[in-house]
Image: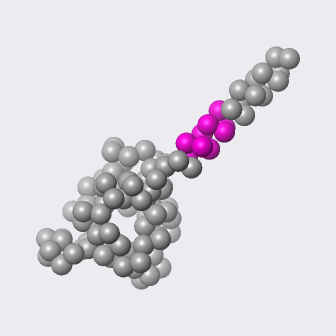
């Protein structure tokens, strides 16, 4: 009996973690934290590009040079004028944003 309670507890914890990971909304996080500079579809406006000429457009060329871990690292650590998000978002949230930006079509 004791073993089955422990196993059920472990299974419940794993299920809870899995559900939490699935419920992270990369689009909502992007809209709240990234859209202002990177644009709705991953293409920064001319005004933003003028302020930050190095800002990236999330197009095929951008993604061809970057793996998912590269995207996660860039979001977490920031680059050039982009601030790091490692202290603002959890790891699963950063991963969700990285996954979401791959769906954008500028």
Q: Quadrant of the N terminus?
A: top right
Q: Residue at x 82, y 24 (%)?
A: 4
Write down the region rendered in magenta. Answer: 13-21
Q: Residue at x 56, y 49 (%)?
A: 22
Q: Please, which colouring scheme is shown?
A: one colour
69 shown above or below 20? below
Predominant secondary structure, magenta span = helix
Return the x and y of residue 94 as percentages of the image width and height: 43, 53
Magenta highlight on residue 14: yes
Magenta highlight on residue 99: no
Return the x and y of residue 77 as percentages of the image width and height: 34, 55
Residue 35 falls in image quadrant: bottom left
Residue 63 falls in image quadrant: bottom left
Residue 79 visible in this rendered orientation of the protein: no
Q: Residue at x 49, y 49 (%)?
A: 24
Q: Quadrant of the C terminus?
A: bottom left
7 shown above or below 95? above
104 shown above or below 61? above
From the viewer's perspective, tell me whether residue 3 is left or right of residue 12: right
Return the x and y of residue 44 as percentages of the image width and height: 26, 73
Return the x and y of residue 95 as percentages of the image width and height: 48, 55
Query: Quick one: which residue is furthest to the top in this view?
Result: 2
């Amino acid at each position: 009996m004791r073993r089955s309670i422990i196993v059920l507890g472990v299974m419940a914890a794993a299920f809870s973690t899995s559900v939490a990971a699935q419920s992270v909304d990369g689009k909502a996080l992007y809209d709240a934290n990234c859209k202002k500079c990177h644009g709705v579809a991953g293409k920064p406006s001319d005004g933003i590009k003028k302020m930050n000429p190095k800002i990236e457009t999330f197009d095929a060329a951008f993604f061809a040079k970057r793996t998912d871990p590269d995207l996660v690292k860039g979001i977490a650590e920031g680059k050039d004028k982009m601030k790091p998000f490692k202290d603002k978002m959890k790891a699963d949230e950063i991963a969700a944003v990285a996954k979401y930006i791959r769906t954008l079509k500028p």
